[in-house]
Image (cartoon, grey):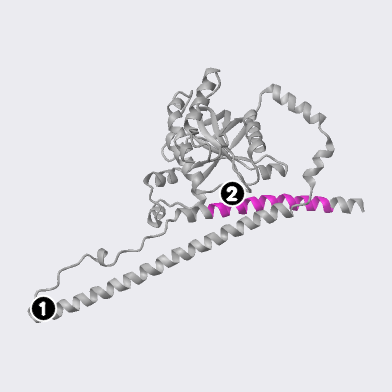
Amino acid sequence: MASRKEAPAAGSSSLGGSKGKAKAVPGDSAVKQVQIDGLVVLKIIKHYQEEGQGNEVVQGVLLGLVVDDRLEITNCFPFPQHTEDDADFDEVQYQMEMMRSLRHVNIDHLHVGWYQSTYYGSFVTRALLDSQFSYQHAIEESVVLIYDPIKTAQGYLSLKAYRLTPKLMEVCKEKDFSPEALKKATIAFENMFEEVPIIIKNSYLINVLLWELEKKSAVADRHELLSLASNNHLGKSLQLLMDRVDEMSQDIVKYNTYLRNTSKQQQQKHQYQQRRQQENLQRQSRGEAPLPEEDMNKLFKPPQPPPRMESLLIAGQINTYAQNIKEFTAQNLGKLFMAQALQEHNN
């Protein structure tokens, strides 16, 4: 991921020529809507089908332009898969050559973000946070598209666009993730990422083609969407949720240990100060000079507070799992009620 973080800086100057680009209000999002061409969606899906296996993540670059407060994504290309043997492969140079080649054939080549697949919604990670901060810091309108192939296989396309909130951008710029800094910035897992609405746009010819294909499609294939089998998907989601809850509990134990150590050190410091005061009073009564003042921070080195960003990311991932389980179970409940009604009607 390290080399991919540097890529936006190379293409950021290209974005400045986007037509109709509006200046964002401070504290407000620069992008209100993401418009994606249907070809881009098909390329992302094809990329995962060809190179994604199980929980392996595939990534790529998004190209397009900014019109007012709308980000139009018109093209994309994948990051090639390479092994440790390909040590000489330069991803930044690869991206620049791809964008240069697209510019030569008069295709939109402006860098506007990146995409990534996810495994059962497991995308709220520190790697994604760092990468999106790098993109968004270089190109203000950048977004990350999250494609969930597991959800898509259940019967509907799962594609979401996210950006870092302005508050989180400021915290990442300062690189201070201490509890005090996050509390001062009022950062919680609910306001770390903001979801941007997505519109998928096709040309009129593609819409006509889709309409003809829909008429030719077999009705029997659609019955798979009514399948009541959900144990595997729901069980895996619950297992991932429990794993994250365990990580959160371990992180809470670490933070409570830090609080206990801090409180214990404060008591020791207070007792030491009282002893010093008593000694100085005794020396003063004997007519002796008081003891010199000492640096308390050198005598009692304060314990290092654990970084809280990992806890926020874990809480955000737990929230994502919970929302996915809620959506999935709501759909299955609807199927169960419909199946019950059909069975009663047949009887």
Residue 68 seen by the camera: no
Per the rendered image, the range of residues in magenta is 315-340
Q: Quadrant of the C terminus?
A: bottom right
Q: Residue 122 got which mark? A: 2
The amino acid marked with disc number 1 is Gln
- For the view shown, which residue lies furthest in the top direction? 105
Name the quadrant containing residue 75.
Answer: top right
- The residue shown at (27%, 75%) is 271
Numbered disc 2: secondary structure: loop
In-front residue for pair 202/51: 51
- The residue shown at (81%, 50%) is 338
Dot in front, 2 or 1? 2
Q: Determine crowd level at label 2: few under 14, some 14-19, many 20+ residues with C-alpha closer than 10 A.
A: some
- For the view shown, which residue lies furthest in the front direction? 85
Q: Residue 284 got which mark? A: 1
Numbered disc 1: secondary structure: helix
Closer to the N terminus: mark 2 or mark 1? 2
Relative to 137, 112 lies left or right: right
The amino acid marked with disc number 2 is Ser
Residue 73 screen position, x and y as percent: 56, 29
